[in-house]
Amino acid sequence: LLILFFQSTYAAVPLVQIGQSPSAKIDGKLDDAGWQNCAQIFPFIENMGKGTARVQTRVKLFYNDHALYFAFICDEPFIDKLVANHKQRDRDVWRDDGVEIHIISPNGKNSFHILFNSLGVTDDSKNGDYGWDPKLQIAAFKQPEKQRWGVETAIPWSELGFAPKPGDSLAMNFTRMRQQKFERSAWNATYGTFRNPARYGKISFAKNPVILKALKIADPVPGVNHVQIGRASCRERV
């Protein structure tokens, strides 16, 4: 199976369709079935829109009736110099190397923000209130031999107060701060603060993720050009 990666470099509002899968064991191994056939977001772009990030980040995601599942996989050529000094929740974790999830509720009234450092410690807030401490499953991992680190997590829908069904969509963004070389990158550039809902992308919920079956690109000509994309269901071999 080939997962369709969603390029967001020049998209004003990028859209990704994610599918359902059984619950995964949150252990940092990413070897459950759900991670093998899920949607992936890649590449990240520099947060001021200056092109793709120098060091890349990939986000895998799927959902079920219980929770929303994310896995960040972060390339890091200076893996031995990761900044990870904060071990207490909501206590300046943003000063470390970290990745962030930004979610807007369906009614637009609530904004959720969760930041993870490479130790799996979080800064989390709801509408800017750090008294919101959701019960998360988190497993951070580091792979020096592959020069990468990451975080696997599950966010129960009960902690967000809603549960999307197939056909629904949510405004979200995924961002990363590298402290060693000070690089800010995102799925969709926010051109300033990461917390800019007007620049979030859209996650569309479906039974199955989008799978690339065939891609046909004609020779480019002046004016409008077209790309034909064939899709397969998650269970169809391609």
Image (cartoon, rainbow, N blue to C red):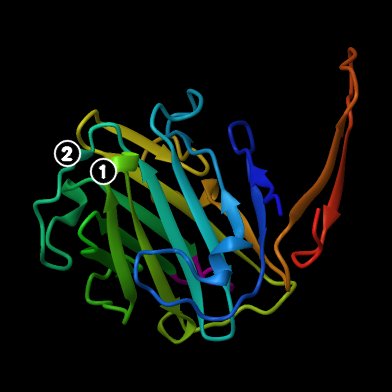
Q: Which label number is shown at residue 80?
A: 2
Q: What are the residue bounds of the magenta stretch? A: 104-110
Specify whether 13 is left or right of 236: left
Quarter of the view holding residue 35: bottom right
Q: Give the residue displayed 25% in from the left and 31% down from the top.
A: 182
Q: Nearer the viewer, residue 213 or 117?
A: 213
User: Across the whole image, how many numbered discs are drawn on residues?
Assistant: 2
Q: Is 196 on the left or on the right of 146, as rendered?
A: right
Q: Amino acid at mark 2?
A: Asp
Q: Is residue 1 magenta?
A: no
Q: Position of residue 58 (x, y in %)?
A: 48, 47
In the rendered image, the vertical position of residue 69 relative to residue 72, given as above or below? below
> Are discs 2 and 1 less than 8 Å apart at CB?
yes
Q: In which quarter of the view is residue 229 placed?
A: top right
> Which of 44/217 is in front?
217
Q: Residue at x 58, y 80 (%)?
A: 22
Residue 99 percent across, percent down from the top left: 34, 51
Residue 87's disc number: none
Judging depth in this view, the residue of 144 and 103 nearest the camera is 144
In the shown orientation, is residue 180 left or right of residue 28?
left
- Residue displayed at 64% across by 62% down: 37
